[in-house]
Image: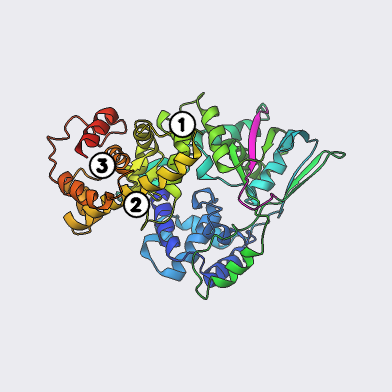
Amino acid sequence: MKSRDELFVNLNNIKSKYDYNKKLIEKMSYEFGNKGLLGKIPNQIFSGLIRVETLNNIELYMFTKILFEETNNSDIRPENYFTQNEINEFDNTIIGKEKVDRIVLENVIQIDDLHWICPYWDVYDIHKVSDNFLLTYNVKSQRELKNVRTSSGKNYQKINVNQKSVDDISQEVLENKFTPNMITLNMRLMDNNNPNYSYNPTTKELIIIPSETIKNNLISDDENKSELKENNKKNNNDTLVDVIDGWNRISGFSKAVTTANESNKILKGGLVVSIVCMTEEDARNYIARESKRNDMSKEYIKAIEKNDYNKIIDQMNNAGDTIANILKDNIGLTMDDVIYNNKLTTYDIMNSALKQTGLDTKDPIDINRKVPKLIDIVTHLVKYIIKYHFSNDKWLIKNKSFLLEPGIFIGYIAIAYELINNQNYLNEIERIGDNLVKLTNKDVSGFKLKSKTPNSIQIYKYFKELV
Protein backbone atom coordinates (compact mmCIF):
# COMPACT_ATOMS: atom_id res chain seq x y z
CA MET A 1 0.00 0.00 0.00
CA LYS A 2 1.45 3.36 -1.05
CA SER A 3 1.42 6.37 1.28
CA ARG A 4 -1.21 9.09 1.15
CA ASP A 5 1.55 11.67 0.64
CA GLU A 6 2.40 9.86 -2.59
CA LEU A 7 -1.25 10.10 -3.62
CA PHE A 8 -1.42 13.82 -2.81
CA VAL A 9 1.64 14.52 -5.00
CA ASN A 10 0.24 12.53 -7.93
CA LEU A 11 -3.27 13.99 -7.63
CA ASN A 12 -1.92 17.54 -7.67
CA ASN A 13 0.30 16.81 -10.68
CA ILE A 14 -2.54 15.27 -12.68
CA LYS A 15 -5.13 17.80 -11.49
CA SER A 16 -3.05 20.68 -12.84
CA LYS A 17 -3.28 19.21 -16.35
CA TYR A 18 -7.09 19.15 -16.17
CA ASP A 19 -7.45 22.53 -14.48
CA TYR A 20 -11.02 23.77 -14.87
CA ASN A 21 -12.05 21.11 -17.38
CA LYS A 22 -15.80 21.79 -17.32
CA LYS A 23 -16.96 18.31 -18.32
CA LEU A 24 -14.74 16.61 -15.75
CA ILE A 25 -15.91 18.94 -12.96
CA GLU A 26 -19.56 18.41 -13.89
CA LYS A 27 -19.08 14.64 -13.84
CA MET A 28 -17.35 14.77 -10.47
CA SER A 29 -20.01 17.06 -9.02
CA TYR A 30 -22.75 14.68 -10.20
CA GLU A 31 -21.00 11.63 -8.70
CA PHE A 32 -20.30 13.45 -5.43
CA GLY A 33 -23.96 14.46 -5.22
CA ASN A 34 -25.08 10.86 -5.76
CA LYS A 35 -22.99 9.91 -2.74
CA GLY A 36 -24.62 12.57 -0.61
CA LEU A 37 -21.38 14.55 -0.66
CA LEU A 38 -21.11 18.21 -1.51
CA GLY A 39 -21.25 18.68 -5.28
CA LYS A 40 -19.18 21.85 -4.97
CA ILE A 41 -16.10 20.01 -3.67
CA PRO A 42 -14.54 19.18 -7.09
CA ASN A 43 -15.04 22.75 -8.30
CA GLN A 44 -13.42 24.11 -5.15
CA ILE A 45 -10.47 21.74 -5.50
CA PHE A 46 -9.82 22.83 -9.09
CA SER A 47 -10.27 26.51 -8.23
CA GLY A 48 -7.72 26.22 -5.42
CA LEU A 49 -10.06 26.75 -2.47
CA ILE A 50 -9.64 23.21 -1.14
CA ARG A 51 -6.42 21.21 -0.88
CA VAL A 52 -6.78 17.47 -1.40
CA GLU A 53 -5.08 16.79 1.96
CA THR A 54 -8.09 18.28 3.76
CA LEU A 55 -10.60 15.83 2.25
CA ASN A 56 -11.96 13.07 4.46
CA ASN A 57 -11.43 9.45 3.39
CA ILE A 58 -14.55 8.97 1.30
CA GLU A 59 -14.16 12.37 -0.41
CA LEU A 60 -10.53 11.57 -1.21
CA TYR A 61 -11.51 8.14 -2.54
CA MET A 62 -14.23 9.56 -4.78
CA PHE A 63 -11.97 12.28 -6.17
CA THR A 64 -9.21 9.72 -6.82
CA LYS A 65 -11.58 7.17 -8.35
CA ILE A 66 -13.23 9.58 -10.78
CA LEU A 67 -9.94 11.21 -11.81
CA PHE A 68 -8.46 7.74 -12.40
CA GLU A 69 -11.46 6.73 -14.53
CA GLU A 70 -11.03 9.91 -16.56
CA THR A 71 -7.25 9.71 -17.03
CA ASN A 72 -6.44 6.00 -16.61
CA ASN A 73 -3.22 7.17 -14.97
CA SER A 74 -1.72 4.31 -12.98
CA ASP A 75 -0.10 6.74 -10.53
CA ILE A 76 -3.52 7.29 -8.90
CA ARG A 77 -5.01 3.80 -9.15
CA PRO A 78 -7.30 3.66 -6.06
CA GLU A 79 -6.28 0.09 -5.18
CA ASN A 80 -2.75 1.35 -4.49
CA TYR A 81 -3.89 3.73 -1.75
CA PHE A 82 -7.09 2.26 -0.30
CA THR A 83 -7.67 -1.22 1.14
CA GLN A 84 -10.28 -3.46 -0.46
CA ASN A 85 -12.44 -3.12 2.66
CA GLU A 86 -12.29 0.68 2.36
CA ILE A 87 -13.17 0.53 -1.34
CA ASN A 88 -16.13 -1.78 -0.69
CA GLU A 89 -17.34 0.44 2.16
CA PHE A 90 -17.01 3.69 0.21
CA ASP A 91 -18.61 2.26 -2.94
CA ASN A 92 -21.66 1.18 -0.94
CA THR A 93 -22.01 4.22 1.33
CA ILE A 94 -24.43 7.10 0.93
CA ILE A 95 -23.63 10.06 3.17
CA GLY A 96 -26.36 11.98 4.97
CA LYS A 97 -24.70 15.38 5.32
CA GLU A 98 -26.46 18.49 6.57
CA LYS A 99 -25.77 21.14 3.97
CA VAL A 100 -25.20 24.77 4.94
CA ASP A 101 -23.94 27.67 2.82
CA ARG A 102 -23.23 30.29 5.49
CA ILE A 103 -21.48 30.87 8.78
CA VAL A 104 -23.85 32.14 11.48
CA LEU A 105 -22.36 33.47 14.71
CA GLU A 106 -24.49 34.64 17.62
CA ASN A 107 -24.02 37.04 20.56
CA VAL A 108 -21.27 38.74 18.57
CA ILE A 109 -19.64 41.87 19.94
CA GLN A 110 -18.38 44.41 17.41
CA ILE A 111 -14.95 45.73 18.46
CA ASP A 112 -14.50 48.10 15.50
CA ASP A 113 -15.54 48.35 11.85
CA LEU A 114 -13.61 45.22 10.82
CA HIS A 115 -13.28 43.24 14.03
CA TRP A 116 -15.82 41.16 15.94
CA ILE A 117 -15.70 38.70 18.84
CA CYS A 118 -18.04 35.73 19.21
CA PRO A 119 -17.82 34.49 22.83
CA TYR A 120 -19.06 30.98 22.03
CA TRP A 121 -19.21 28.98 18.78
CA ASP A 122 -20.91 25.66 19.44
CA VAL A 123 -19.16 22.40 18.57
CA TYR A 124 -21.97 21.28 16.23
CA ASP A 125 -21.98 24.59 14.35
CA ILE A 126 -18.20 24.32 13.96
CA HIS A 127 -18.62 20.84 12.50
CA LYS A 128 -21.30 21.91 10.00
CA VAL A 129 -19.19 24.80 8.75
CA SER A 130 -16.05 22.66 8.52
CA ASP A 131 -17.89 19.73 6.92
CA ASN A 132 -19.28 22.01 4.23
CA PHE A 133 -15.87 23.48 3.36
CA LEU A 134 -16.86 27.04 4.22
CA LEU A 135 -13.43 27.69 5.75
CA THR A 136 -10.21 28.03 3.78
CA TYR A 137 -6.65 26.95 4.58
CA ASN A 138 -4.80 29.75 2.79
CA VAL A 139 -1.11 28.87 2.46
CA LYS A 140 -0.26 32.56 1.89
CA SER A 141 -1.39 33.53 5.38
CA GLN A 142 -0.80 30.30 7.28
CA ARG A 143 2.11 28.73 9.05
CA GLU A 144 4.93 27.10 7.12
CA LEU A 145 4.14 24.20 4.83
CA LYS A 146 5.73 20.92 5.83
CA ASN A 147 8.28 19.49 3.38
CA VAL A 148 7.90 15.76 2.73
CA ARG A 149 9.86 13.35 0.57
CA THR A 150 7.73 10.40 -0.52
CA SER A 151 8.94 6.81 -0.77
CA SER A 152 9.38 7.24 -4.53
CA GLY A 153 11.68 10.20 -3.96
CA LYS A 154 9.23 12.96 -4.92
CA ASN A 155 9.34 16.22 -2.97
CA TYR A 156 6.05 17.59 -1.72
CA GLN A 157 4.84 20.44 0.49
CA LYS A 158 1.81 19.60 2.60
CA ILE A 159 -0.21 21.78 4.92
CA ASN A 160 1.27 21.84 8.39
CA VAL A 161 -1.52 20.15 10.33
CA ASN A 162 -0.44 18.39 13.51
CA GLN A 163 -2.50 15.20 13.37
CA LYS A 164 -1.59 14.24 16.93
CA SER A 165 -2.85 17.62 18.10
CA VAL A 166 -6.08 17.13 16.13
CA ASP A 167 -6.56 13.68 17.69
CA ASP A 168 -5.83 14.96 21.20
CA ILE A 169 -8.29 17.84 20.81
CA SER A 170 -10.91 15.47 19.43
CA GLN A 171 -10.50 13.17 22.43
CA GLU A 172 -10.79 16.06 24.88
CA VAL A 173 -13.98 17.23 23.18
CA LEU A 174 -15.41 13.69 23.29
CA GLU A 175 -14.69 13.59 27.03
CA ASN A 176 -16.12 17.13 27.48
CA LYS A 177 -12.77 18.23 28.89
CA PHE A 178 -11.75 20.83 26.31
CA THR A 179 -11.39 24.33 27.74
CA PRO A 180 -12.69 26.95 25.24
CA ASN A 181 -10.02 29.24 23.80
CA MET A 182 -9.84 31.67 20.90
CA ILE A 183 -9.37 31.02 17.20
CA THR A 184 -9.15 33.68 14.47
CA LEU A 185 -11.09 33.75 11.20
CA ASN A 186 -10.25 36.25 8.48
CA MET A 187 -12.75 37.47 5.90
CA ARG A 188 -10.06 38.01 3.31
CA LEU A 189 -9.93 41.50 1.82
CA MET A 190 -9.29 41.32 -1.93
CA ASP A 191 -9.02 43.98 -4.64
CA ASN A 192 -12.36 45.44 -5.75
CA ASN A 193 -14.33 43.08 -3.52
CA ASN A 194 -16.48 43.54 -0.46
CA PRO A 195 -16.86 40.45 1.75
CA ASN A 196 -20.40 39.12 1.76
CA TYR A 197 -21.45 39.49 5.38
CA SER A 198 -24.05 41.22 7.52
CA TYR A 199 -23.98 42.21 11.18
CA ASN A 200 -27.10 43.12 13.13
CA PRO A 201 -26.15 45.18 16.20
CA THR A 202 -29.61 44.60 17.72
CA THR A 203 -29.65 40.79 17.53
CA LYS A 204 -25.82 40.66 17.61
CA GLU A 205 -25.85 38.09 14.80
CA LEU A 206 -23.00 37.97 12.26
CA ILE A 207 -23.70 36.10 9.01
CA ILE A 208 -20.96 35.36 6.46
CA ILE A 209 -21.69 33.71 3.09
CA PRO A 210 -18.45 32.35 1.56
CA SER A 211 -17.95 32.03 -2.21
CA GLU A 212 -17.70 28.71 -3.98
CA THR A 213 -15.15 29.84 -6.57
CA ILE A 214 -12.50 32.52 -6.91
CA LYS A 215 -13.27 35.32 -9.36
CA ASN A 216 -10.88 35.61 -12.33
CA ASN A 217 -9.11 32.42 -11.33
CA LEU A 218 -9.16 31.16 -14.92
CA ILE A 219 -6.26 31.66 -17.27
CA SER A 220 -7.55 30.19 -20.52
CA ASP A 221 -10.38 31.06 -22.88
CA ASP A 222 -10.83 27.62 -24.39
CA GLU A 223 -14.30 26.13 -24.92
CA ASN A 224 -14.43 24.40 -21.55
CA LYS A 225 -13.38 27.45 -19.56
CA SER A 226 -14.98 30.51 -21.16
CA GLU A 227 -18.41 30.02 -19.55
CA LEU A 228 -16.88 29.62 -16.10
CA LYS A 229 -14.77 32.72 -16.65
CA GLU A 230 -17.86 34.74 -17.65
CA ASN A 231 -19.78 33.55 -14.59
CA ASN A 232 -16.90 34.50 -12.33
CA LYS A 233 -16.70 38.00 -13.83
CA LYS A 234 -20.25 38.64 -12.66
CA ASN A 235 -19.33 37.95 -9.05
CA ASN A 236 -18.05 41.10 -7.37
CA ASN A 237 -18.18 39.97 -3.76
CA ASP A 238 -15.90 36.97 -3.52
CA THR A 239 -15.82 35.98 0.14
CA LEU A 240 -13.17 33.64 1.48
CA VAL A 241 -12.96 32.90 5.19
CA ASP A 242 -9.40 31.90 6.07
CA VAL A 243 -8.55 30.19 9.34
CA ILE A 244 -5.42 32.10 10.28
CA ASP A 245 -5.22 30.63 13.77
CA GLY A 246 -7.05 27.49 14.90
CA TRP A 247 -7.12 24.97 12.04
CA ASN A 248 -6.09 22.07 14.29
CA ARG A 249 -8.78 22.93 16.82
CA ILE A 250 -11.52 23.20 14.19
CA SER A 251 -10.39 19.87 12.68
CA GLY A 252 -10.37 18.28 16.14
CA PHE A 253 -13.88 19.53 16.95
CA SER A 254 -15.23 18.30 13.61
CA LYS A 255 -13.64 14.90 14.05
CA ALA A 256 -15.15 14.63 17.56
CA VAL A 257 -18.66 15.26 16.20
CA THR A 258 -18.22 12.64 13.48
CA THR A 259 -17.05 10.10 16.08
CA ALA A 260 -19.81 10.99 18.56
CA ASN A 261 -22.52 10.69 15.91
CA GLU A 262 -21.60 7.05 15.36
CA SER A 263 -22.64 6.23 18.94
CA ASN A 264 -25.34 8.92 19.35
CA LYS A 265 -23.22 10.65 21.97
CA ILE A 266 -24.17 14.25 22.78
CA LEU A 267 -21.26 16.69 22.97
CA LYS A 268 -20.82 19.97 24.75
CA GLY A 269 -18.27 22.65 24.15
CA GLY A 270 -17.19 25.33 21.75
CA LEU A 271 -14.63 27.97 20.91
CA VAL A 272 -14.26 31.72 21.23
CA VAL A 273 -13.90 33.32 17.78
CA SER A 274 -12.16 36.50 16.72
CA ILE A 275 -13.38 37.58 13.27
CA VAL A 276 -11.26 40.06 11.35
CA CYS A 277 -11.12 41.57 7.85
CA MET A 278 -7.53 41.70 6.55
CA THR A 279 -5.57 41.47 3.35
CA GLU A 280 -3.30 38.44 2.94
CA GLU A 281 -0.32 40.69 3.70
CA ASP A 282 -1.82 41.89 6.99
CA ALA A 283 -2.82 38.34 7.91
CA ARG A 284 0.76 37.18 7.30
CA ASN A 285 2.01 39.93 9.55
CA TYR A 286 -0.48 38.88 12.22
CA ILE A 287 0.79 35.29 12.00
CA ALA A 288 4.39 36.54 12.23
CA ARG A 289 3.63 38.43 15.44
CA GLU A 290 1.76 35.51 16.98
CA SER A 291 4.35 32.97 15.93
CA LYS A 292 7.23 34.68 17.68
CA ARG A 293 5.86 32.84 20.70
CA ASN A 294 6.13 29.39 19.09
CA ASP A 295 8.61 27.29 17.15
CA MET A 296 8.03 28.65 13.65
CA SER A 297 11.38 29.11 11.90
CA LYS A 298 13.01 32.54 12.15
CA GLU A 299 13.64 32.48 8.40
CA TYR A 300 9.92 32.12 7.68
CA ILE A 301 8.91 34.77 10.22
CA LYS A 302 11.34 37.29 8.70
CA ALA A 303 9.97 36.54 5.23
CA ILE A 304 6.32 37.18 6.11
CA GLU A 305 6.88 40.16 8.39
CA LYS A 306 5.55 43.45 7.10
CA ASN A 307 8.54 45.76 6.56
CA ASP A 308 9.80 48.14 3.88
CA TYR A 309 12.27 45.72 2.32
CA ASN A 310 9.78 42.85 2.17
CA LYS A 311 7.36 45.16 0.35
CA ILE A 312 10.04 45.78 -2.29
CA ILE A 313 10.70 42.03 -2.53
CA ASP A 314 6.95 41.44 -2.92
CA GLN A 315 7.09 43.86 -5.85
CA MET A 316 10.04 42.01 -7.37
CA ASN A 317 8.31 38.66 -6.86
CA ASN A 318 5.04 39.78 -8.45
CA ALA A 319 5.91 42.31 -11.17
CA GLY A 320 5.30 41.53 -14.83
CA ASP A 321 5.83 38.04 -16.20
CA THR A 322 8.69 35.55 -16.26
CA ILE A 323 9.88 36.84 -19.65
CA ALA A 324 10.38 40.41 -18.42
CA ASN A 325 11.21 39.48 -14.83
CA ILE A 326 13.31 36.42 -13.99
CA LEU A 327 12.49 36.98 -10.30
CA LYS A 328 8.75 36.61 -10.95
CA ASP A 329 7.44 33.93 -8.54
CA ASN A 330 11.03 32.85 -7.97
CA ILE A 331 11.73 34.32 -4.53
CA GLY A 332 10.84 31.76 -1.89
CA LEU A 333 9.84 32.39 1.69
CA THR A 334 12.47 29.94 2.96
CA MET A 335 15.36 27.85 1.68
CA ASP A 336 12.96 24.89 1.55
CA ASP A 337 11.22 26.71 -1.32
CA VAL A 338 14.54 26.73 -3.19
CA ILE A 339 15.10 23.02 -2.51
CA TYR A 340 11.57 21.71 -2.99
CA ASN A 341 9.94 24.25 -5.31
CA ASN A 342 12.87 25.30 -7.52
CA LYS A 343 12.80 28.94 -6.40
CA LEU A 344 15.96 30.90 -7.21
CA THR A 345 16.55 32.65 -3.89
CA THR A 346 14.76 33.69 -0.68
CA TYR A 347 13.22 36.74 0.94
CA ASP A 348 15.89 36.76 3.65
CA ILE A 349 18.74 36.72 1.13
CA MET A 350 17.16 39.45 -1.00
CA ASN A 351 16.51 41.46 2.16
CA SER A 352 20.22 41.38 3.03
CA ALA A 353 21.10 42.47 -0.51
CA LEU A 354 18.68 45.41 -0.63
CA LYS A 355 19.83 46.73 2.74
CA GLN A 356 23.34 47.22 1.31
CA THR A 357 22.20 49.21 -1.72
CA GLY A 358 21.36 52.34 0.25
CA LEU A 359 17.94 52.41 -1.40
CA ASP A 360 15.70 54.94 0.39
CA THR A 361 12.74 52.77 1.42
CA LYS A 362 10.83 55.84 2.65
CA ASP A 363 10.95 57.58 -0.73
CA PRO A 364 8.23 56.15 -3.04
CA ILE A 365 9.58 58.11 -6.02
CA ASP A 366 13.02 56.54 -5.54
CA ILE A 367 11.47 53.11 -5.13
CA ASN A 368 9.25 53.42 -8.22
CA ARG A 369 12.20 54.59 -10.33
CA LYS A 370 14.84 52.15 -9.15
CA VAL A 371 13.10 48.85 -8.39
CA PRO A 372 11.85 48.22 -11.96
CA LYS A 373 15.37 49.05 -13.19
CA LEU A 374 16.90 46.57 -10.72
CA ILE A 375 14.51 43.87 -11.96
CA ASP A 376 15.34 44.67 -15.59
CA ILE A 377 19.12 44.61 -15.11
CA VAL A 378 19.12 41.37 -13.06
CA THR A 379 16.83 39.74 -15.64
CA HIS A 380 18.96 40.78 -18.61
CA LEU A 381 22.18 39.73 -16.87
CA VAL A 382 21.01 36.28 -15.81
CA LYS A 383 19.28 35.58 -19.12
CA TYR A 384 22.38 36.68 -21.04
CA ILE A 385 24.55 34.27 -19.05
CA ILE A 386 22.11 31.38 -19.52
CA LYS A 387 21.58 32.02 -23.24
CA TYR A 388 25.15 32.65 -24.38
CA HIS A 389 27.14 30.50 -21.98
CA PHE A 390 24.80 27.63 -21.05
CA SER A 391 22.92 26.94 -24.30
CA ASN A 392 19.79 28.63 -22.93
CA ASP A 393 19.44 25.74 -20.46
CA LYS A 394 18.49 26.79 -16.94
CA TRP A 395 19.12 23.30 -15.58
CA LEU A 396 22.58 23.17 -17.15
CA ILE A 397 23.67 26.33 -15.34
CA LYS A 398 22.28 24.97 -12.08
CA ASN A 399 24.17 21.70 -12.43
CA LYS A 400 27.44 23.04 -13.86
CA SER A 401 27.86 26.40 -12.14
CA PHE A 402 27.28 28.42 -8.97
CA LEU A 403 25.76 31.27 -11.01
CA LEU A 404 22.19 30.39 -9.97
CA GLU A 405 22.87 29.59 -6.32
CA PRO A 406 20.59 31.48 -3.91
CA GLY A 407 23.37 33.68 -2.49
CA ILE A 408 24.59 34.80 -5.92
CA PHE A 409 21.55 37.07 -6.19
CA ILE A 410 23.14 39.35 -3.60
CA GLY A 411 25.88 39.83 -6.19
CA TYR A 412 23.39 40.41 -8.99
CA ILE A 413 21.64 43.10 -6.94
CA ALA A 414 25.04 44.72 -6.26
CA ILE A 415 25.83 44.76 -9.98
CA ALA A 416 22.38 46.06 -10.89
CA TYR A 417 22.55 48.87 -8.37
CA GLU A 418 25.94 49.99 -9.69
CA LEU A 419 24.54 50.07 -13.23
CA ILE A 420 21.24 51.70 -12.34
CA ASN A 421 22.25 55.15 -13.65
CA ASN A 422 24.27 53.85 -16.60
CA GLN A 423 22.49 54.56 -19.90
CA ASN A 424 24.56 51.87 -21.66
CA TYR A 425 23.88 49.16 -19.09
CA LEU A 426 22.92 46.58 -21.75
CA ASN A 427 26.44 46.72 -23.21
CA GLU A 428 27.91 46.56 -19.72
CA ILE A 429 25.77 43.50 -18.93
CA GLU A 430 27.42 41.55 -21.76
CA ARG A 431 30.90 42.46 -20.54
CA ILE A 432 30.09 41.62 -16.93
CA GLY A 433 28.26 38.41 -17.88
CA ASP A 434 31.26 37.22 -19.91
CA ASN A 435 33.52 37.87 -16.91
CA LEU A 436 31.19 36.19 -14.39
CA VAL A 437 31.33 32.85 -16.20
CA LYS A 438 35.13 32.93 -15.86
CA LEU A 439 34.90 32.92 -12.06
CA THR A 440 36.00 29.71 -10.37
CA ASN A 441 34.91 28.03 -7.15
CA LYS A 442 38.14 29.34 -5.62
CA ASP A 443 37.09 32.92 -6.44
CA VAL A 444 33.88 32.60 -4.45
CA SER A 445 35.12 30.32 -1.69
CA GLY A 446 33.88 31.47 1.69
CA PHE A 447 30.80 33.19 0.22
CA LYS A 448 28.47 30.30 1.29
CA LEU A 449 26.35 30.81 -1.82
CA LYS A 450 24.24 27.69 -1.14
CA SER A 451 23.51 28.61 2.46
CA LYS A 452 20.34 30.28 3.72
CA THR A 453 22.71 32.74 5.44
CA PRO A 454 25.41 33.54 2.87
CA ASN A 455 28.16 36.05 3.63
CA SER A 456 26.14 38.92 2.24
CA ILE A 457 28.52 41.80 3.02
CA GLN A 458 31.47 39.98 1.44
CA ILE A 459 29.41 38.98 -1.62
CA TYR A 460 27.98 42.46 -2.18
CA LYS A 461 31.37 44.14 -1.93
CA TYR A 462 33.06 41.63 -4.28
CA PHE A 463 30.48 41.93 -7.05
CA LYS A 464 30.18 45.69 -6.67
CA GLU A 465 33.92 45.94 -7.31
CA LEU A 466 33.60 43.63 -10.34
CA VAL A 467 31.55 46.31 -12.10
Q: Which amino acid type is marked by label 2?
A: Ile
Distance CA(mark 2)–CA(mark 1) = 25 Å
Look at the magenta stretch and give its main secondary structure.
loop
Residue named by callout 2? 326
Q: Is residue 329 magenta?
A: no
Residue 78's spot in the image, x, y percent?
44, 60
**Mark 2 or 3, nearer chain start:** 2
Residue marked by disc 1: 301
3D distance between C-alphas at marks 1 and 3: 22 Å
Nearest to viewer (mark 2 / mark 1): 2
- Residue most extreme to the bottom: 223
Residue 405, numbered label: 3
State whether residue 162 is above or below residue 436: above
| Residue 193 lies in the magenta-colored region | yes
Mark 1 nearby-residue class (10 Å; few <14, some 14–19, many ≥20): many
Q: Nearer the viewer, mark 2 or mark 3?
A: 2
Res 232 visible? yes
Q: Give the magenta part as a residue range.
A: 180-195
Name the kind of residue labelled 1 in the image. Answer: Ile
> Residue 265's spot in the image, x, y percent?
70, 39
Q: Nearer the viewer, residue 84 or 316?
A: 316
